Amino acid sequence: MLLIPCPHCGPRAQTEFSYERTVDSVVQPGGDPTEAMEHLFTRANPRGPDEEIWRHTYGCRAWLIMTRHRATHAIEAMRAVGPEALP
């Protein structure tokens, strides 16, 4: 289990969070459906850091972007996004 450093609540257990998707998997509406399917399901899975979108569902409910290493699961950075972001 990961110990995730929420910028609002401090370190919390992974069970308080909901994983959404990687940042690069966001598809813009109105595109070609075939390209959207390829973008979502046929992409590389390299080792190294990746940005993921998470939500602190059972805490402050903030949307967060976590930079996490795919192989070691080490969390390199965490930042809030949207209206919950700190100034």
Image: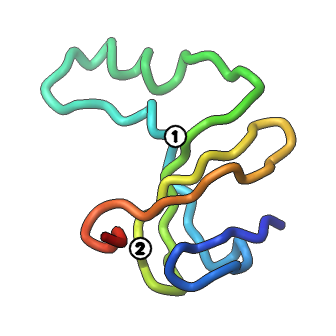
Where's residue 12, x and y in %? 69, 80
Badge 1: how crowded within 10 Å, few (<14), some, or many (20+)? some
> Where, quadrant-wise, is the N terminus in this rendering?
bottom right
In this rendering, position of residue 66 left or right of residue 82 = right
Between 45 and 76, which is closer to the camera in this rendering? 76
Q: Residue furthest left?
A: 30
Q: Position of residue 5 (x, y in %)?
A: 66, 71
**Distance CA(mark 2)–CA(mark 1):** 16 Å
Where is residue 33? Give x, y as percent: 26, 19
Q: Which structural element holds mark 1?
A: strand
Q: Quadrant of residue 51?
A: top right
Count of marks overlaid on the render:
2
According to the picture, the residue beneath numbered tag 2 turns out to be 62
Whether residue 72 is situated above or below residue 84 in the rendered picture: above
Left or right of 1 in this view: 60: left
Please report whichever mark, 2 or 1, sits nearer to the chain's N-terminal start. 1
Label placed on residue 34:
none
Residue at image position (18%, 32%) is 29
Tag 1 residue: 22
Which residue extends farthest front?
87
**In the foreground, 28 or 41:** 28
Residue type pointed to by label 1:
Thr
Q: How crowded is the residue under tag 2: few (<14 C-alpha within 10 Å), some, or many (20+)?
A: many
User: Where 34 sits versus 22, above or below?
Assistant: above
Q: Position of residue 48 (x, y in %)?
A: 74, 29
Q: What residue appears at the point 52 percent right and 86 percent down from the top-left corner?
A: 59
Question: Residue shown at 40%/21% (left/top)?
Answer: 37
| Frontmost residue, 54 versus 32 | 54
Q: Is residue 32 above or below residue 59?
A: above
Residue 21's place in the image compared with 79, above or below, is: above
Quadrant including the C terminus: bottom left
Asked whether, in this view, residue 82 is left or right of residue 78, the answer is left
